[in-house]
Image: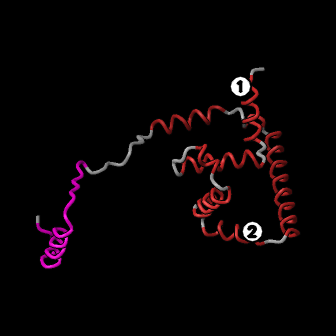
Amino acid sequence: MSHFEDLQKLALLAVLKPDYNSWMRRVCRWYSKSFQTPLEEVENLPTTYVLQHYWEAVYEDLEDDERLAKIVELLENPEDRAIRLAQEKADEDLFVAALEEELKANPEALKNKKTLKKGIKAIEKLSLKPPPGPEEVDIRFVDESILDQMVEAADSKGKPQK
């Protein structure tokens, strides 16, 4: 095995079963991309500084109901958290078991490529084009005094003067 293959295996393991270090590397990569900061510089920033920005960005992107659920989760005591996590694990186990039963009953469900091909053909038939934009955009930079004159003219006449 080559050194590169070993590194690939370690990287894949870090993605499949992340530990604290691999999670922090992911956060550092996010910060580096988000703020156009070289990764070496990000790794030298205080961890709390990087994490504060990471969590703020994560929470900004949440819907209100998801944000409320996160608040409740962060405020729950350890006993309640253990109960909730056990229930979530039980729900996940039930879902996986039901999915396995469904696949046992209909093993062809995974092998049905006709449906996939029909879906691809249907998508290809759609004319997916960007919406038409303005043919020409006219942007002019003007001095603030000229802008004030245009605003006054528009207020007095209903239309800006050229």
The kind of residue on which mark 1 rests is Phe
| Mark 2 lies on residue | 74
Q: Nearer the viewer, residue 148 or 93?
A: 148
Q: How is the image coloured?
A: secondary structure
Question: Relative to residue 23, is residue 62 drawn left or right?
Answer: left
x, y percent for residue 147: 19, 68
x, y percent for residue 141: 22, 58
Element under disc 2:
helix
Q: Nearer the viewer, residue 42 or 115?
A: 42
Q: Earlier in the sequence, mark 1 or mark 2?
A: 1
Res 100 quadrant in image: top right
| Name of the residue lying farthest toward the bottom | 156
Crowdedness near tag 1: few (<14), some (14–19) or many (≥20) residues, C-alpha within 10 Å: few
Q: Nearer the viewer, residue 45 or 55?
A: 45
Magenta segment range?
135-161
At 38% from the left and 45% from the top, the residue drawn is: 130
Work out whether 107 lies above or below 85: above
Q: Which mark is residue 128?
A: none
* Measured Cα–Cα span from mark 1 to mark 2: 40 Å
Q: Can you say which quadrant of the picture contains the C terminus? A: bottom left
Res 53 quadrant in image: bottom right
Element under disc 1:
helix
Work out whether 95 lies above or below 115: below
Q: Is residue 34 magenta?
A: no
Circle 1 or circle 2, nearest the eye: 1
x, y percent for residue 58: 62, 59
| Mark 1 lies on residue | 4
At 21% from the left and 54% from the top, the residue drawn is: 138
Question: Relative to residue 61, is residue 148 drawn left or right?
Answer: left
Q: Nearer the viewer, residue 103 or 72?
A: 72
